C-alpha cells in the first residue's frame, strides 16, 4: 500500500529556491497514532515535508551526476500525455522513526521543475510503484496544467483527488494493463493517443 | 472566475475566515450549487491546507460540509471538495460522519477516505464488509470498495472477525477465478453510429493479440471491461496484502505433522475437489493457479510496448505471492519449485527481467531445503553476473541491496557465494551513491570479518576509482566493434578508454572490476591506474562516491575493532601508513580520508599499544619524512601523539632506551626542520597543532629517558625565538603562536622536576576509571605544575 503521495517543487540547490510541497495526500491514519488533534495534523505535514526535502536532495544529486543543467523549459504546454520513459527518478529508504514510525520506501520521478513521489510500505512491489508514478505524473501535468504559468494546482485539489481516486484509490496500486488504463482514461475524459 | 490566483492570500484572519465560511455556507445551501460553489470550496481548501496549525472552522459549518458530502443530490465535484476539506482538517472533533446509511459504493468510498483519515478504521471495515456480504443493488459495483478494504486491513488487520475474513475470502476466490471471458460492451451512447441491436461480445485476448483460452487475469485484453473483470483486477491488486494478513493464521490442517518431503503431499486441490475446501484454503488454491497463469502469460510478446513493463511487475508479484502461499502451506512447494525453475531458466539471460530474479532467489532461499533442490546455480548467477552487468540500473541496485539486507544472515558464512561477492556489491554503491549509502552503512558490518578486512580496506579507499573504472567499462562496452581493439599495444594509451584494453592497464582494470573476493590476485600496485583515472576525478558521480568513503571508513574501523586480533591490527596500521601515499587524487576526498585515518590510527594504537614497538621501522620511516607533516597532517599528528603516549616500557617490555632515543632523534629532526628561523623554499609549513604535539611527544620521551632532558629543554627554550621570528609571524596567527609558546613553557617547567614529569607522562596503564581521569586531565595537570613552579607571574625562561 502507498502511505502518501506528494507533488513538490524541488527548488534549486541549497541556498536557492526552497523545496515546496504543492499537493500531498495521505491514505488513512495508522491505528495507534496518538490522537492529538492539531499535533497529529502538524506531525503529518512535517513528515511529508521531510519526504519532499529528501526527494529534492536526491533529485538534485542525480541530475548533477547525469550532467543535467538546470531544468529546460518546454516550448509550449503539452496538450496530450507526455511519455516519461526517460524522466530521471529513483528509490530510497527512510528508516523507522525518521520520519515515519515504520520504515518506508520512497519512489520518485522528476519532470522539469516538479517532482512526484510515492511513500510506500516496506516490501511493496516497487516495479508497480514506478509504473503507477509514470502514469500519474503525465495525467496530473495535463489536467492541472502544471507546467504553465500561474498554475494553480493549489486551487484544484479536486482534479488531483479525482486522478488519485482512480489510479491509486486509497493508496492501492493497480495492475492496469494498457487497455484497462485506456478504459480508465475514457472514464476520466482524458484523450490519449494509444 | 472570481478570486483566481494572484490576488488571493491564504493567511487571512479569523474574522475574515468566518465571513468567508458564511458565504460558502450560503452558496452551498442554494438549490443548485454550481461553479461559484466549486470556486468557494477550492479557496476554502487552500486556506485550510496552507497553514501548519489548523484553522478552526465553525462546528455548524463542518456539519454542513458533512451533509453536503453525504447527500446523493450533491454534484460529484462538490462532494470531492467537501471530502478534501474534511480530510485536510482531520483529526477533527466536530466530525460526526457515519458511513452506516450510505448505499452508493462510490460515495461510500469517498466518505471512507474521510473516516480513515479520522482514524475510524474499524467502523469503516465493518461497513464495507457488510455491504460486500450482501448482493449489491443494480448499478452498484463492489470494485470501489476493495481498495477501502485493502486500506483498512493495512491500517488495522484486527478490524475484521474471522467469520468476516472467510466471507470475503470466498468472494475474492470467485472474483479471481470466474470473471467473464467475454469482452464487455461499450456503454450505449446513442448518436449517429450507435447500432440498434447489441453486438456479439468478442472474447478476451492475450497481450500478444491471440484469443485467450484460459481464465481472465490482469493481463487479459478487452476493448471494454465488465464489472466482474474490474473486480478481478482489483482483487489481484490487493491479493498479496490479504494473504499476508489472513492467509496463515491457523495451523495448516492439510499437512499432517512430521511430513518433511513434499513428494508425499499429493493433496487434491483443483477441480471439483476445490469446492470442498474451506474459504482460506480455497482462496489460496485459486491464487496459486492465478499466479501460474500470470507467469505463463508473461512469456508473450506484447503488442503494446508498455504492457511489457506490467508483465514484469505481474511476474514479480506472482512469484512473491507463490512464496507467501508456500510459507502458509508447504504442500504447494513441490509444484512451485519445478515451475519457478523453468521460469528462471527462461529469464535468466534477459537483462530486462533482472529484477524478477530477486523474488525467485528469495523463494528458493525460503523453500529449497524443503524441496531438497539445489539452487546454488541460481544464487551464483544472481551474485556474479547481475551486479557486474546492471550496476547502473538504479532500481535494480536498490532492490538488490534490500535483498542483501533482508537476508543478511547469508553473509555470515565466509565461504558462501554471497560473502565472496562483496566486490560486486560495492559496484552498486560506487555508481548510485546518494540513495544507497545509508543501505550500505547497514550492510557493511555483515561483510566484515578477519578474512575480508584487508581487502575491504583497500576497496573502500579505492571506491571512487571503482566509479571511474565502471564509467570507462560502460563507455567501452558501447563502442562499435571496430574501435574495441584497444589501440597500439606498444605505445602508451592516449585516453582512459584506450587504456581499458591496453596490456599495461588491463589487468589492473580487471582486478578493480572483479566480481569475487580475490586478495591473492591483487596486482603489485594500482598506482598507475589511479593516476590514469585522475582524468575522471572531477566527474560528479565520482565525487558523490568519494563523499561516502569517510562515513564507511569510520564504520569499518569501528566494526573491525570489535574482532581484530593483534596481528590484524598491526597489518592495518602498516597498510594505513602505506595507503596514505596512494589515494585517488581528489583534494577534498584526501583531506577527509586523512582525518578519519588519523583518528582511527590513534584508536588502533590505544587498542594495541605494543604496536608502536613492533612496527617501529614503519613508524619511524613515516614520522621521519618531513613532507608528511604538511601533506598528511592529521595522520602525522596522531602518529606522533601515539608514539609519545605508548612508546614506553610500561606498555611493552621490549621497549629499549635505544628505541626511545631513535624515535626522539627522528622527531627532533622533523621539529627542527619546521621551526627553522631561516626557512628555505622547501621547508614545509604545518599546522600549529602538529608543532604542539611534537613538542609534547619529545618531552614525554625525554621523561622516560632522562639523558634526553637537556636536549629537549634547550630546544623548547629556543621556541620563544622561533615564535617571534618573521618566519613564524608571517605564517601563523598570534593566538596560535601564543599557544605554542605557552605549551613550550609548560613542558619545560615540567622537565625541571624530572620525577614529576616521569609520573605525569608515564602513568601505569589506566585500568581504573580514576586513572583514566588522571590521564584525561593531563593539560590541567601541566598547568597546575607550572603554577606551582612559577609563583611569580611573568617569569619566563630566556
Image (cartoon, coloured by chain):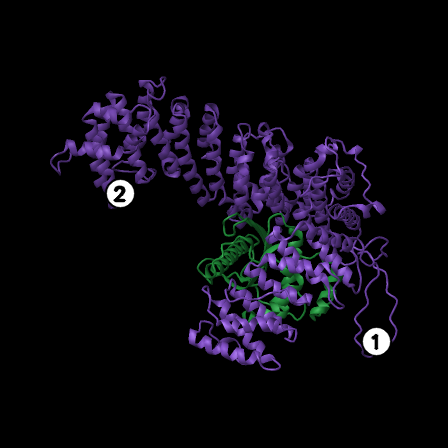
Nearer to the camera, B431 or B258: B258
Left or right? Give the position of B321 relative to B48. Answer: right
Nearer to the camera, B574 or B503: B574
Nearer to the camera, B191 or A86: B191
Nearer to the camera, B65 or B754: B65
Q: Quadrant of residue A176?
A: bottom right
Give chain B's shade.
purple
Seen as rendered, the residue at the extreme left is: B792
Q: Picture coordinates of residue A61 (x, y %)?
A: 53, 53
Quarter holding the N terminus of chain A is: bottom right
The chain that appears green in the image is A
Q: Picture coordinates of residue A85 (x, y %)?
A: 66, 58
Q: Secondary structure at mark 2?
A: helix
Q: Is residue A77 visible?
A: no
Q: Picture coordinates of residue A13 (x, y %)?
A: 48, 58
Same chain? Circles 1 and 2: yes
Quarter holding the C terminus of chain A is: bottom right
Mark 1 packing: few (<14 Cα in 10 Å), some, or many (20+)?
few
Image height of B288 relative to B757, above or below: below
User: Which mark sits nearer the N-terminus, 1 or 2?
Assistant: 1
Q: Which residue is mark 2?
A: B736
Q: Chain of mark 1?
A: B
Image height of B247 relative to B647, above or below: below
Callouts 1 and 2 close, C-beta under 8 Å: no
Q: CA distance from mark 1 to mark 2?
A: 93 Å
Q: Which residue is mark 1?
A: B194
Mark 2 packing: few (<14 Cα in 10 Å), some, or many (20+)?
some
Q: Chain of mark 2?
A: B
Q: Picture coordinates of residue A74 (x, y %)?
A: 60, 68
Image height of B162 relative to B783, above or below: below
Q: Secondary structure at mark 1?
A: loop
Amino acid at each position: 500500500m502507498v502511505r502518501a503521495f506528494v507533488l513538490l517543487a524541488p527548488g534549486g540547490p541549497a541556498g536557492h529556491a526552497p523545496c515546496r510541497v504543492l499537493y500531498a495526500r495521505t491514505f488513512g491514519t495508522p491505528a495507534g497514532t496518538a490522537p492529538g488533534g492539531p499535533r497529529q495534523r502538524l506531525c503529518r505535514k512535517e513528515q511529508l515535508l521531510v519526504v519532499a526535502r529528501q526527494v529534492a536532495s536526491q533529485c538534485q544529486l542525480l541530475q548533477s551526476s547525469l550532467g543535467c543543467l538546470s531544468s529546460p523549459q518546454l516550448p509550449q504546454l503539452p496538450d496530450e500525455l507526455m511519455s516519461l520513459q526517460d524522466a530521471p527518478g529513483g528509490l530510497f529508504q527512510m528508516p523507522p522513526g525518521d520520519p515515519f514510525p515504520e520504515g518506508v520506501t520512497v519512489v520518485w520521478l522528476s519532470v522539469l521543475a516538479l517532482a512526484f513521489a510515492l511513500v510506500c510500505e516496506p516490501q511493496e512491489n516497487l516495479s508497480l510503484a514506478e509504473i503507477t508514478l509514470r502514469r500519474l505524473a503525465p495525467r496530473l501535468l495535463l489536467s492541472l496544467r502544471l507546467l504553465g504559468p500561474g498554475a494553480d494546482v493549489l486551487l484544484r485539489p479536486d482534479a488531483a483527488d479525482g486522478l488519485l481516486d482512480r489510479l491509486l484509490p486509497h493508496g492501492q496500486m493497480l495492475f492496469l494493463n494498457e487497455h484497462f488504463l485506456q478504459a480508465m482514461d475514457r472514464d476520466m475524459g482524458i484523450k490519449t493517443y494509444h | 472566475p472570481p478570486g483566481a490566483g494572484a490576488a488571493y492570500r491564504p493567511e487571512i484572519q479569523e474574522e475574515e475566515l468566518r465571513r468567508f465560511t458564511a458565504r460558502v455556507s450560503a452558496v452551498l445551501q442554494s438549490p443548485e450549487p454550481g461553479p461559484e460553489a466549486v470556486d468557494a470550496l477550492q479557496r476554502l481548501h487552500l486556506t485550510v491546507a496552507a497553514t501548519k496549525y489548523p484553522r478552526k472552522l465553525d462546528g455548524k459549518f463542518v456539519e454542513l460540509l458533512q451533509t453536503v458530502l453525504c447527500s446523493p443530490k450533491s454534484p460529484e465535484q462538490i462532494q470531492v471538495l467537501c471530502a478534501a476539506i474534511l480530510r485536510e482538517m482531520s483529526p477533527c472533533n466536530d466530525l460526526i460522519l457515519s458511513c452506516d446509511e450510505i448505499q452508493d459504493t462510490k460515495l461510500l468510498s469517498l466518505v471512507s477516505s474521510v473516516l480513515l483519515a479520522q482514524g475510524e478504521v474499524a467502523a469503516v471495515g465493518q461497513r464495507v464488509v457488510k455491504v460486500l456480504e450482501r448482493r449489491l443493488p443494480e448499478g452498484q459495483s463492489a470494485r470501489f470498495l476493495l481498495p477501502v478494504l485493502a486500506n483498512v486491513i493495512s491500517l488495522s488487520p484486527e478490524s475484521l472477525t474471522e467469520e468476516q475474513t472467510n466471507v470475503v475470502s470466498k468472494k475474492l476466490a470467485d472474483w479471481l477465478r470466474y470473471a467473464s471471458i467475454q469482452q464487455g460492451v461499450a456503454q450505449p451512447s446513442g448518436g449517429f453510429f450507435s447500432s440498434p441491436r447489441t453486438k456479439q461480445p468478442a472474447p478476451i485476448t492475450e497481450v500478444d493479440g491471440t484469443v485467450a483460452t484460459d481464465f481472465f487475469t490482469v493481463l487479459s485484453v478487452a476493448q471494454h471491461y465488465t464489472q466482474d473483470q474490474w473486480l478481478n483486477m482489483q482483487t489481484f491488486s490487493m491479493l498479496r496484502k490479504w494473504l499476508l494478513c489472513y492467509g496463515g493464521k491457523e495451523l495448516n490442517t492439510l499437512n499432517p505433522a512430521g511430513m518433511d518431503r513434499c513428494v508425499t503431499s499429493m493433496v487434491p486441490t483443483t477441480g471439483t475437489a476445490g469446492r470442498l475446501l474451506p474459504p482460506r484454503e480455497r482462496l489460496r488454491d485459486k491464487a496459486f493457479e492465478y499466479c501460474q497463469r500470470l507467469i505463463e502469460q508473461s512469456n508473450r510478446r506484447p503488442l503494446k510496448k508498455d504492457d511489457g513493463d506490467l508483465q514484469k511487475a505481474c511476474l514479480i508479484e506472482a512469484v512473491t505471492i507463490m512464496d507467501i502461499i508456500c510459507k502458509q502451506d508447504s504442500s504447494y512447494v513441490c509444484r512451485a519449485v519445478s515451475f519457478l525453475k523453468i521460469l528462471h531458466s527462461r529469464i535468466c539471460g534477459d537483462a530486462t527481467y533482472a529484477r524478477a530474479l530477486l523474488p525467485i532467489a528469495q523463494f528458493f532461499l525460503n523453500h529449497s531445503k524443503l524441496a531438497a533442490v539445489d539452487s546454488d546455480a541460481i544464487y551464483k548467477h544472481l551474485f556474479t553476473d547481475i551486479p557486474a552487468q546492471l550496476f547502473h540500473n538504479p532500481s535494480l541496485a536498490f532492490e538488490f541491496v534490500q535483498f542483501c539486507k533482508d537476508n543478511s544472515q547469508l553473509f555470515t558464512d565466509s565461504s558462501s557465494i554471497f560473502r565472496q561477492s562483496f566486490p560486486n556489491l560495492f559496484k552498486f554503491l560506487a555508481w548510485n551513491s546518494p540513495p544507497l549509502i545509508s543501505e550500505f552503512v547497514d550492510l557493511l558490518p555483515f561483510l566484515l570479518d578477519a578474512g575480508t578486512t584487508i581487502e575491504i580496506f583497500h576497496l573502500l579507499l579505492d571506491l571512487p576509482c571503482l566509479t571511474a573504472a565502471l564509467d570507462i567499462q560502460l563507455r567501452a562496452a558501447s563502442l562499435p566493434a571496430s574501435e574495441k581493439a584497444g589501440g597500439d599495444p606498444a605505445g602508451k594509451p592516449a585516453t582512459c578508454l584506450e587504456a581499458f584494453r591496453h596490456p599495461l592497464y588491463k589487468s589492473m582494470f580487471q582486478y578493480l572490476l572483479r566480481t569475487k573476493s580475490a586478495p591473492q590476485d591483487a596486482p603489485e600496485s594500482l598506482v598507475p591506474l589511479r593516476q590514469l583515472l585522475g582524468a575522471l576525478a572531477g566527474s560528479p558521480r565520482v565525487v558523490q562516491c568519494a563523499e561516502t568513503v569517510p562515513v564507511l571508513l569510520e564504520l569499518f574501523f569501528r566494526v573491525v575493532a570489535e574482532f581484530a586480533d593483534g596481528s590484524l591490527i598491526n597489518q592495518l596500521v602498516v597498510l594505513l601508513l602505506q595507503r596514505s601515499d596512494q589515494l585517488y587524487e581528489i583534494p577534498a576526498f584526501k583531506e577527509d580520508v586523512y582525518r578519519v585515518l588519523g583518528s582511527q590510527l590513534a584508536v588502533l594504537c590505544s587498542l594495541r599499544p605494543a604496536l608502536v614497538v613492533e612496527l617501529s621501522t614503519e613508524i619511524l620511516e613515516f614520522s621521519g619524512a618531513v613532507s608528511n607533516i604538511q601533506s598528511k597532517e592529521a595522520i602525522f599528528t596522531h602518529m606522533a601523539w601515539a608514539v609519545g603516549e605508548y612508546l614506553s616500557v610500561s606498555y611493552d617490555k621490549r621497549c629499549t632506551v635505544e628505541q626511545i632515543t631513535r624515535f626522539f632523534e627522528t622527531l627532533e629532526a622533523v621539529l627542527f626542520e619546521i621551526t627553522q628561523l631561516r626557512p628555505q623554499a622547501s621547508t614545509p609549513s604545518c599546522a600549529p597543532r602538529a608543532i604542539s604535539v611534537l613538542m609534547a611527544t619529545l618531552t614525554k620521551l625525554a621523561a622516560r629517558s632522562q639523558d634526553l632532558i637537556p636536549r629537549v629543554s634547550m630546544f623548547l627554550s629556543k621556541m620563544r625565538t622561533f615564535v617571534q621570528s618573521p618566519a613564524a609571524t608571517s605564517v601563523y596567527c598570534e593566538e596560535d603562536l601564543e599557544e605554542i609558546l605557552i605549551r613550550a613553557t609548560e613542558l619545560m617547567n615540567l622537565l625541571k622536576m624530572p620525577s614529576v614529569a616521569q609520573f605525569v607522562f608515564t602513568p601505569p596503564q589506566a585500568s581504573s576509571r580514576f586513572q583514566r581521569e588522571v590521564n584525561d586531565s593531563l593539560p590541567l595537570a601541566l598547568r597546575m605544575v607550572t603554577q606551582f613552579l612559577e609563583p611569580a607571574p611573568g617569569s619566563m625562561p630566556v
